[in-house]
Image: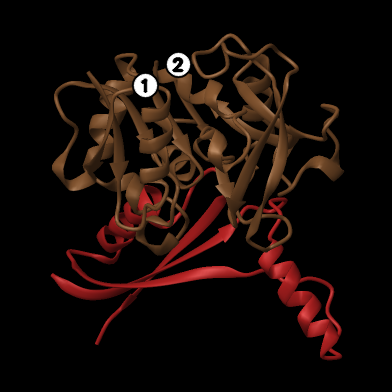
Chain colours: A brown, B red
Amino acid sequence: MTVSIVRFGGSNCDRDALRALHHLDVDAEIVWHEDGLPADTSGIVLPGGFSYGDYLRAGAMAAHSPVMADVRDLAADGVPVLGVCNGAQVGSESGLTPGAFTTNASARFQCEHVHLRVENADTPWTRAYDEGDVLSIPIAHGEGRFEISDDRLDTLEDENRVLFRYCDASGEVSPESNPNGSKHSIAGVLGERETVAVMMPHPERATLPDVGGTDGQGVLEGFA
Amino acid sequence: MAAYTATVTVRLKRGVLDPEAETTKKALERLGFELDDLRSADRFELDLDAESADDAADRAEEMAERLLANPTIHDYTVEVDARE
């Protein structure tokens, strides 16, 4: 039983995810995407990075790697899947989760700490938190603006599938606390099952006490 | 079989913010040009052999649906021309 961290050409947060999961005593290993998923895969991380150099659109190429068919099959069986940053872009491009992550409203790459408000604490990724909790977690992306059609956005909200929203330190959601222009300040969403989630901020970079805050630990504990 | 070039143009749906186009527009205005709006698009030229122009268009459309465009944010058009 091990969490498979899928490494694509250009992934660069795979080792961060590995160290963060090991810190939480979660068995995990890095898997090269062309090798397929090990038979004992009990969870899947689609890590951050710049798979395929972000050619065409961030995540578009990796989303069509053959391994993603296996990821979709396991996700449908209830195996937990978490996509972070580029992994979130791969997840949405592959249809695991709704919407799309596209160019920041600033048209710039943004690397900064942001605050997230927990919108749904009744998922494996957020059960360590309470609804309304405010987390400090870094972002590092140029294409993180969440876009979705208005009717699908309504459905997403009605079905309580928004996991996190960007907010300020007090938990208030406003245009000023929205770093990239995401619709409804959405930073992370659930797939059709609550065991599948994608998010642009990096919980694996907010897990090891030696490198700063640890607010992201609760997200990765979804694999515990 | 005949030779065709299918041109797929992928653009953001109207109403979807295009920060790069906005930045480009501002850069043109800084150069002294006047314009009301600017829209950008990606254009892919696909050389392929097909039974007919319709067949070539069908295949290009499938490529757009599967990879070249993201239907969540993009519209696309396909035009087919005979290739010498």
Q: Is residue A10 left or right of residue A196?
A: left
Residue B40 spot, x, y in % from top left = 62, 70
Residue B26 in the image, given as x and y percentages of width and height? 80, 76
Task: Give me the disc on residue B9.
Answer: none
Q: How many marks?
A: 2
Q: Is residue B1 left or right of residue A170?
A: left
Q: Residue at x 46, y 47 (%)?
A: A86
- Looking at this view, name the residue that lies furthest to the front: A210
State if disc 1 and disc 2 touch (CB < 8 Å): no
Neighbour tally class for label 1: few under 14, some 14-19, many 20 plus, Cα within 10 Å: few
* Above or below: residue B64 compared with residue A119: below
Q: Quadrant of residue A25?
A: top left
Task: Name the residue beneath numbered marker 2.
Answer: A193
Circle 2 — which element?
Answer: loop
Q: Few, some or many C-alpha atoms within 10 Å of disc 2 (few <14, some 14-19, many ≥20)?
A: some
User: SS at mark 1?
Assistant: loop
Q: Are marks 2 and 1 on the same chain?
A: yes
Q: Quadrant of residue B47?
A: bottom left
Q: Amino acid at mark 1?
A: Asp
Quadrant where the N terminus of chain A sits is top left
Residue A144 visible in the displayed image? no
- Residue carrying label 1: A25
Answer with left or right where residue A116 lies relative to residue A177. left
Rendered-image quadrant of the C terminus of chain A: top left
- What residue appears at the point 49 percent right and 14 percent down from the top-left corner? A124
